[in-house]
Amino acid sequence: MSMRIIGTGSALPEKYVTNNDLAELVDTSDEWIRERTGIAGRHVSTGETVAELAALACGRALADAGRRAEQVELLIVATCSPETGIPSVACQVQSSLGAVNAVAFDLNAACAGFLFALHTAWAYVQSGICRNALIVGAEVLSKLVDWTDRGTCILFGDGAGAVFAEQCDRGGILSFVQHSDGRKGEVLRCDSRALTNPYVRGVMQSPWVKMDGREVFSFAVRQVPTGITEALRQAHLKAEEVEMFVLHQANFRIIEGIARRLGLDADRFPMNLDRVGNMSSASIPVLLDELNRAGRLKEGMKMVLSGFGAGLTWGACVLNWQREC
Ligand code: ACO
């Protein structure tokens, strides 16, 4: 028993912010941002919430799969930027979709969140707990970013991507690996609330994303190829047999570095980060949706998905793209 993705969807906020727009806010330039990151622009929420974007992406994934909301049995939202601590974003999405039969919950593994949620759904489906799942990555990171810090505000974008997946007897997901290293948590951090109650008055350090860019860079280029190689070994495949590597869209130099370490041409690594920036857990499913709608995902093609980010967390999945049973 395995699980195959049969529908994809995505949603992006209306407002689009170019590098030149950012150069009016902080001391930066279009040239610097493009050269160091590959990013040219990103969507930024002017009101759209994580739950609203996630629900839109889910509706589109269900329509693409030809399924109804009442048929959904599991709904996982991967996010690190929810507007509410409770209820979960997943429960809000369940309500707006009318997915009345779904079990819904959130999961936070930062930029690896979508991969971790997909893995969780796969485990549920394989063990027979449910027969299908809606898996969403959704972020409004613009509210966690210090818009006076040129080192971070240029990197991120807002958006949501979703896939609908269901059980299958063959093909679909072939292998999965997941890793975490909490010892490196300080490399990329965002605090939420200070402990304050009648007995203690906590002091909030800073509510914004803080990042050691160089550490993140070397972690990604070192660990991600190892994770991908491990997942390929489990699937009994060689890297050369994989047609497409859909990676978390952090930075084109990271992706090129990973391709080089795997001994592959970067043209097998599609990218959309130039247009949408780094959308954390939303980046893989949004790119997957773009590729699907552009007709670039061929029946039977071997693919690798790989996410990596704060925690630290990273993971990889090998799959056979197979919408037909
Ligand atoms: N515009 C102009 N200059 C800038 C900017 C900017 N936006 N940001 C930093 N600088 C300056 C710095 O102040 C510094 O100036 P100085 O030499 O006078 O001190 C200089 O540029 C070099 O700064 P570095 O931080 O050393 O620049 P670096 O070459 O490392 O590039 C970057 C920074 C792009 C963040 C890089 O470290 C990187 O890509 N890291 C990966 C981080 C990442 O992708 N994070 C995403 C979130 S995590 C994830 O998704 C996995």
Image (spheres, helix red, strand yellow):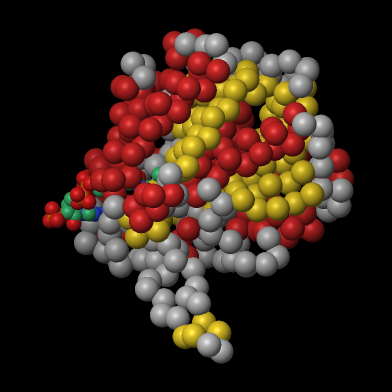
Compare residues 274 and 112 and report the one nearer the observer.
112
Quarter of the figure with residue 83: bottom right
Depth check: 117 or 255 in front? 117
- Against 190, is 165 above or below? above
Does residue 90 show up? Answer: yes
Q: Residue at x 55, y 18 (%)?
A: 234
- Is residue 310 among the parts visible in the rendering? no
> Where residue 299 sits: x, y (%)?
65, 15
In the picture, measured across the screen, residue 116 lies left or right of residue 261, that is right
Q: Give above or below for 281 relative to 179.
A: below
Q: Name the residue furthest front.
A: 199
Q: Is residue 96 above or below residue 76?
A: below
Q: Could you tell me which quadrant the N terminus lies in?
A: top right
Q: How many marks?
A: 0
Horizontal side, residue 167 vs residue 83: left or right: right
Side of 293 where 261 appears, left or right: left
**Quadrant including the C terminus:** top right
User: Dividing the picture into quarters, in which one does residue 152 lie?
Assistant: bottom left
Horizontal and vertical percent position of residue 226: 40, 26
